[in-house]
Amino acid sequence: MKYIRSGITFGLIGGALTLLFGGWSVAVIGSLMGIGLGLALGGSFERKDPLKIAATVLPSALVAAVILVALSFYQNSVVQEAIGKRPFAANLALNANLIGFFGSVLFAAFVAAIHGLPQNQERAIKIALLATLVVLFPFIDKLTALRWTAQIIFALIFVILGLGLNIVVGYAGLLDLGYAAFFAIGAYTTGILSSPQHGIFLNFWLVIWIAAAMAAVWGLMLGAPTLPLRGDYLAIVTLGFGEIVPVLFKNLTDVTIKEPLTCWILPGLMNLFGAQTTMSCITLVEHEDLTAGDKGISPIGRPSLPIISPNEAVGLALVVKVVVLVLIVGLIGYYLFRAISSKQYKRVAGLAAGLLAAIVFFIPLPHPEKGFMATFMAVIQPGEFKSNDPTTWYFLIIAIILLSIFVIQRLRDSRLGRAWMAIREDELAAAQMGIDPVRTKLAAFAMGATFSGFAGAFYAAYIAGIFPSVFDFSTSIIILCVVILGGIGNINGVIVGGLAIMTADRLFLPALKDFLSSLLTHTILPSISDPVVQLAVKDNANPILYRFLLFGLTLVIMMAVRPEGLIPNAQVRAEMHGEEATAEKAKA
Amino acid sequence: MLELKDVHTYYGNIHALKGISLTVNDGEIVTLIGSNGAGKSTTLRTIQGLNKPRSGSVVLDGVELHKLPAHQIAVMGVAQSPEGRMIFPRMTVLENLEMGAYVRKDRSTFNDDLEHVFKLFPRLKERINQKGGTLSGGEQQMLAMGRALMAKPKILLLDEPSMGLAPLLVELIFDIIQEINKEGTTVLLVEQNALMALSIAHRGYVLQTGEIILSDDAQSLKNNEMVKKSYLGVE
């Protein structure tokens, strides 16, 4: 019975979403809902008979699917009409609903059944399933004309930011309230180094590393004088830094740098001795508009693919690209060699795939022939990343996220990672163990800043323009919420948190706004005679206006119901629910 | 081996140590006894670099510890089982012990040392994957001592190892201290339980309001009238 209840809950949530999005969304939402239901139910079974689990889950999956499809049909027949949109053609709607129905039932049963397998097999299948979903998503999105990919990319940018901040807040336990400043530094570095603003057009694949390094350097520069501070004091200093950086970028519109020796020191000395000065002053930069103020920098150069294109045979760009290519292939090759010599064949397969991907990614390809590979080739077609096709961008940011997760996991399990955790637990005791607190905290700040540098560079290139208002305090807070809501100190939690918050903000709210405004236009608004009231109703029925209210409400509810986050770190959960756990143990 | 010369330490304006001089020789157990607030823990904190002496010197095998920050003093071979134990509450027993070995560069003997600590404290092995914060007081004391031993220190500083423990456990802990010492680790022991401390130590110092008022070998201190009256509770 309790399974049926979760089936009803999931069906209602999925159905409500199809009401908003309409069209083909029922197919996608159905499949995702099935996976969610399978995950939610599967955990409560014993690890033995997969088929039996599937059979037990089936009724509730069917209930969920029926609710979903019923709401979807209702949407297409009644709601579309009511909000004044043309209903979806009947045969298409039938197809979409069939896919949604079977997708949700099959996925729910399959994902739940996986829980019956031994743990390592369950893990392997789940990873394979996730990888398939991630790879197929943009293509499905294109086929179903939902246009979600572009918004998902924003969510993924915040995932990287969350992962970076998680190093600082989750691992080292330092509260950073100005993290968006490093995001801004990464973005502005990219903007300055590859835009017409200064006539510098460095290649994106180079700039992204410079941006990350720049953010890291600023992390060190902020950290060095302030990290001996603890707790609340450090939080206040980071808050100040977070306020200063956007203001600085806003106002660096008239920069003059004079060489101090010839301009002030020597003339000053000569004046002191009463001599007339006719010395010429060396000016390095005069009245340079570094950041273009509120107007922002645009357009910013986009990355190009492959890294070495056939028509780019000479010059610095080629040298840079070859160096990057050699580095990447060399690194993967080195690990591959080590994996082969230690006979870890699973790793060999993974690394070989990586090597192949690197070569495909960077080596020039012949223009795609029409036919079998055409769709795939269109993605990795030589040339610039396009603004009208998010697919390539999507895969780029997925690659950056995978790289970040790999590096962060290695860091977490390293000597440095342990030192971070010791500092978080007890700074004094850590010092007694021989850990240098200041250097360890500096490393956390610099590493955290590095990842926001990557995110900033990607963001600047993706938007192709940057503006100081993007990097204000609320951005820092949203990133912090991604970490806390998802589960502080847990990589999976941060990913889920970032996706949840940003899809709600970027997908759900705009869809709700469209839905409400068309609904009102066709129902209540015409019946209101007073034009002032009519306008007021129309303007205020915009949920985007209330995004921070809704956001705050979510936070309050989350902190009351589940303070450890969506997917908590085991240690944090033990701390927050320690008493309950021991009580349960005592009962058992 | 370890020598403190005329050490003055302050907490703000409070003059906590008023010219402490003491020596600990290789292979000894030396104990500091004294009442609350006499400056016993402050002396250990000063050796460890958690409080800096305003004047005076702390020298370990020719290295001037008072010029180094705390984390480098740990590298020099000073490990402490601190007052209040200060274990890492959200790390497991094993992770706590691994943190103890943080200063060491040689990984090869890590497993042997771990086995050694588990031999001294079999209880820790039973709780190897339990979080430090969920251990009982006695187990936490064992963990703090085991963690300090994992650093293979030249000198082990023990701050009130008997505090808050059941009498039976106190006996056990003191037996283990003697065993550690027999294996060649020098021990500086701070203790309120003067009788226990003096019965295992080679030498002792008596502290009163930041000054050393008596120093002698442990047996003579035990028989000293003043010590008997003030610290051993013998009328």
Image: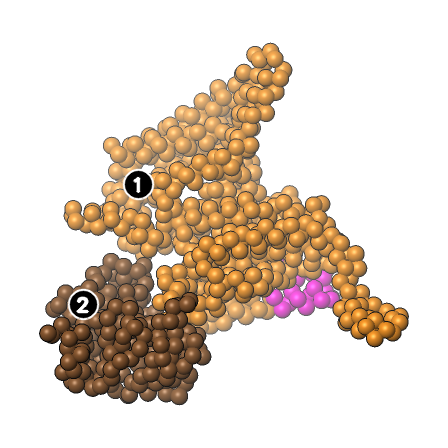
Residue B121 in percent (x, y) is at: 19, 72
Mark 1 lies on residue: A41
Q: State the residue at coordinates (61%, 46%).
A: A470
- Chain of the residue under label 1: A
Q: Residues within 10 Å of mark 2 (few under 14, many from 20)?
A: some
Q: In this structure image, what is the colour of chain A? A: orange
Identify the residue at image location x=65%, y=57%: A189
Identify by letter the chain in brown: B
Q: Residue at x 45, y 27 (%)?
A: A72
Question: Is residue B8 found left or right of B114 in the rendered image?
Answer: right
Q: Position of residue A449 (x, y in %)?
A: 54, 59
- Where does residue B85 sit, x and y in percent of width and height? 28, 66
Q: How many marks?
A: 2
The residue singled out by tag 2 in the image is B123
Viewer can see residue B158 = no
Occupied quadrant, residue B129 = bottom left
Of residues A347 and A417, the one drawn nearer to the viewer in this rendering: A417
- Mark 2–mark 1 Cα distance, whole angstroms, equals 39 Å
Tell me which amino acid carries mark 1: Leu
Q: Which residues are magenta?
A: A305-324
Closest to the observer: B36 or B200?
A: B36
Q: Residue at x 48, y 49 (%)?
A: A480
Q: Secondary structure at mark 2?
A: helix
For mark 1, give the secondary structure.
helix
Chain of residue at mark 2: B
For label 1, count other residues whose C-alpha is less than 10 Å away and answer few (under 14), some (14-19) or many (20+): many
Vertical comparison of A396 with A414: above or below: above
Same chain for the residues under marks 2 and 1 in the image: no
> Eyeballing the image, is A549 above or below B213?
above
